[in-house]
Image (cartoon, helix red, strand yellow):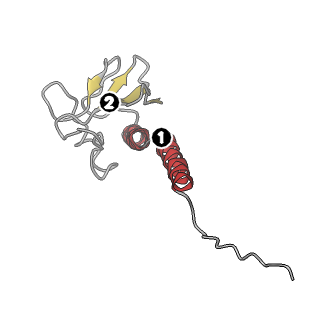
Amino acid sequence: MKKLLIKNSKKGFTLIELLIVIAIIAILAVLVFVSLDPVQRFADARNSRRWSDVNNVLTAVHEYIVDNDGALPSGLTAGMSSTEVGSCGTCVNLSGPLAPYLKSMPLDPQGGSAANTGYSVDVDSNNMVTVYSTAAENAATIQVSR
């Protein structure tokens, strides 16, 4: 009769195998975190809000112009250079004339206030109105003209 050898086999992972798996998981976690880049995503979200605000202000200005037979809102004049929107001394205050068209004057998501909203308006000699954000992030230019 042949002798049967019964081998005691212990099942499990070695320390090296566990360390390799942990290292791979850590590398994948870092890659996912870097690819998502939360700082960039927050900046993109704030810029999206700025785009929306700029479009809303410009739409309100044009609705005012249409409702008032082509007259610009008070504070805006043809050939006007770039001016901040707000209630400060050097700003143009559009909250009164645009009140029927906007629930409230939009504020920049990062530091806008009633005195200085973070948005500017420019009117050229042909009454073309341009509204833009003065605090756009990541070298973005946020402006709309009509």
Left or right, 66 with respect to 102, comes to right
**Can you give x and y, in whole percent of width and height, for residue 72 in the image?**
34, 31
Q: Which mark is residue 135?
A: 2
Nearer to us of marks 1 and 2 is: 1
User: In which quadrant will I find the N terminus?
Assistant: bottom right
Seen from this angle, which residue lies furthest right? 1
SS of the residue at dot 1? Answer: helix
Q: Which mark is residue 34?
A: 1
Q: Which mark is residue 67?
A: none
Looking at the picture, which amino acid does disc 2 mark? Ala
Q: Is residue 133 above or below residue 53?
A: above
Front residue (pair 103, 136) = 136
**Can you give x and y, in whole percent of width and height, for residue 60 in the image?**
38, 42
Q: Is residue 93 above or below residue 77?
A: below
Q: Quadrant of residue 55?
A: top left
Give the residue displayed 27% in from the left and 49% down from the top. Answer: 104
Answer few, some or many: residues within 10 Å of disc 2's Cα (few below 14, many 20 plus, some between 14 and 19). many
**Can you give x and y, in whole percent of width and height, for residue 127 in the image?**
41, 24
SS of the residue at dot 2? Answer: loop
Q: Is residue 73 above or below residue 29?
A: above
Give the residue displayed 23% in from the left and 38% down from the top. Answer: 111
Left or right, 26 with respect to 121, comes to right
